Image (tube, helix red, strand yellow):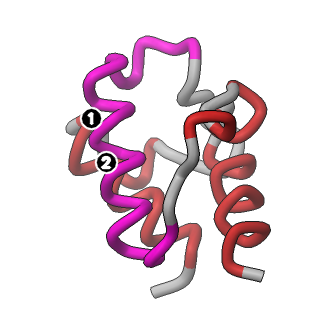
Amino acid sequence: MNYKEKIISNISKISRISEKDLNLDTKIYDSRIISSLQMLEVMSEIEKQFNIMINPEELIPANFQDIKSIIGFIEKKIS
């Protein structure tokens, strides 16, 4: 499973929205797809799955705006 599939799977599970209704441009931050509490769940899953630590200064909209930006954030953290 690649980054996109893992992120979409996590968001689908947490939000209870079908995976087929999520794509790279699906807005996550500032949307009604997930609540702020669910966003914390998404971040926790990202940390576990990708073995990374999300620092407080990285909790900015640009890193979590949509699925594409989340993937870019993870790729930067891993490299």
Label 2 amino acid?
Answer: Ser
Instruction: Say which residue label 2 marks.
Output: 12
Q: Measured from the top left, where is residue 60 in percent x and y?
A: 68, 28
What's the residue type where badge 1 is placed? Ser
Report the front residue among 18 and 55.
55
| Relative side of 71 to 20, left or right | right
Q: Are marks 2 and 1 in contact (CB under 8 Å)?
A: yes
Q: Is residue 70 left or right of residue 50?
A: right
Q: Where residue 54 sits in the image (x, y, percent)?
A: 53, 52
Image coords of residue 61 (percent x, y): 69, 25
Q: Quadrant of residue 49?
A: bottom left
Distance from disc 2 to disc 1, alpha carbons, whole Å, reads 5 Å
Q: Is residue 37 left or right of residue 4?
A: left
Q: Is residue 42 magenta?
A: yes
- Which region shows up in magenta? 30-52
In the picture shown, does residue 44 fall above or below 62? below
Residue that appears at 60% across and 49% down: 23
Q: Which residue is mark 1?
A: 15
Q: Is residue 14 magenta?
A: no
- Which class describes the residues within 10 Å of circle 2: few (<14), some (14-19), or many (20+)? some
